[in-house]
Image: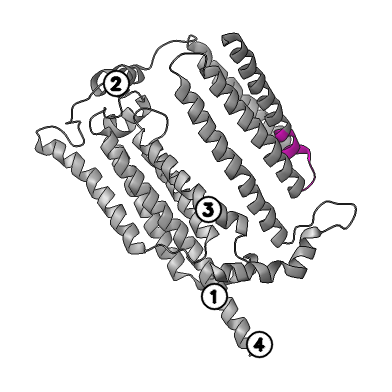
Amino acid sequence: MVQILTYLGYFLVLLGAIFLFLGGLGIVRLPDIYSRLQAGTKASTLGAMSLILGVGILALRQPGHWNWFIKAIVIIIFIALSNPISSHALARGSYRHKIKPWTKEDIDAYKDYIEHEGIEKESEEIKNE
Amino acid sequence: MKKAIAIILLAFIAVELFVVFYKIPFGADRMNVARFYLENSPKKLGVANAVTAIVVNFRGFDTLGEVTVLFLASTALGSILFRRREIHTRLSHLRTSVEASVIVRIAGRFLVPLIILLGAYVFIHGHLTPGGGFQGGVIIATGFLFLLLAYRKFTIEHRTITFVESLAGITFAGIGLIGIFLGKTFLENFLPAGKLNDLLSGGIIPLIYIAIGFKVAAELTGILDTVLSISIDVKQKEIESQTEKNE
């Protein structure tokens, strides 16, 4: 049992480290803010989550350290909530500031959404709250 | 030419540093003050975090000064920004007139309590784990920043902030004065040290850190609210002028 937990924990830590490295590489190498946000959100969220879960599982090997595992789960839930939301707000803010995406084709689904229904719908929702 | 000068200067500094550090034997224990702190903070005060013991107990008077500096900074920022409101209208085109999205507003409902809980945890456990009053206060202020950004209707009563801030400051100074009344020095520990690694240990250190946490949180929230209120004022003026033009 202890051996299984050890292998699983170290595997998750290694996976998390790899994903965090890829996320950092993406932030350096990708061309514009939207794709950088994608690297900084998807890769680093998964990386941080798996790294923290791995640490929690490694702590389970010692008796009496189960509270580490529970704390790790709480941190994972917090990261899963906060990281995508913050990058959503960043992406939306940079779109509102008219930063052009780095694309070959002129695809802009969010613009269509705003033009057809977005603004009125959102302002109505705000009024209803 | 500039690069050559920079490289020569860097090489000069590197050589000087090398000469200085070469004379010190590697791993030598020459820090008598540091040794004193490391030995005495667990033994005499019962504090696991030596940094906290230094900041709040050994150099508590210094921390009182730091808190005063923060208070002065927030007061000065508030007065400056409040007077020169007109200057900021020039920046108005940089600000969006759109409210935060549905995702952010819904997420705020359960993220903000978690953020404030984390801040309280950090400053209550200041004598046990890394962190403390300043860090916990900043975390709580980010929670209030979230509220201010996500909900435009959310307002902060500046009287409440001033009250919390003053109360926390008075608590800090009052705990210090109790030490004098009990025949010790200012900010000296007068409570029992307790067991190492217990939540209720370290004498007056947790009390002072709770006061600092409240003070820092209130001050930073006040600063953030002052900065953001300017943008909201600008926006209101813009909307008013636009409606006047349309009419």
For the residues labelled 2 and 1, the Cα–Cα distance comes to 55 Å
Magenta-tinted stretch: A23-32
Q: Is residue A24 magenta?
A: yes
Q: Dot 2: what SS?
A: loop
Q: Amino acid at mark 2?
A: Leu
Element type at marker 3? helix
Q: Residues within 10 Å of mark 2 (few under 14, many from 20)?
A: some
Q: Can marks 3 and 2 be said to lie on one chain?
A: yes
Q: Label 1's element?
A: helix
- Residue beneath disc 2: B196
Residue on which the image places disc 3: B108
Which residue has dot 1 on it?
B236
User: Mark 4 — on which chain does it sit?
Assistant: B
Q: How many marks?
A: 4
* Sequence-wise first label, 4 or 1: 1
Is A18 on the left-hand or right-hand side of B86?
right
Q: Residue at x 54, y 40 (%)?
A: A78
At label 4, the amino acid type is: Asn
Q: Are marks 4 and 3 on the same chain?
A: yes
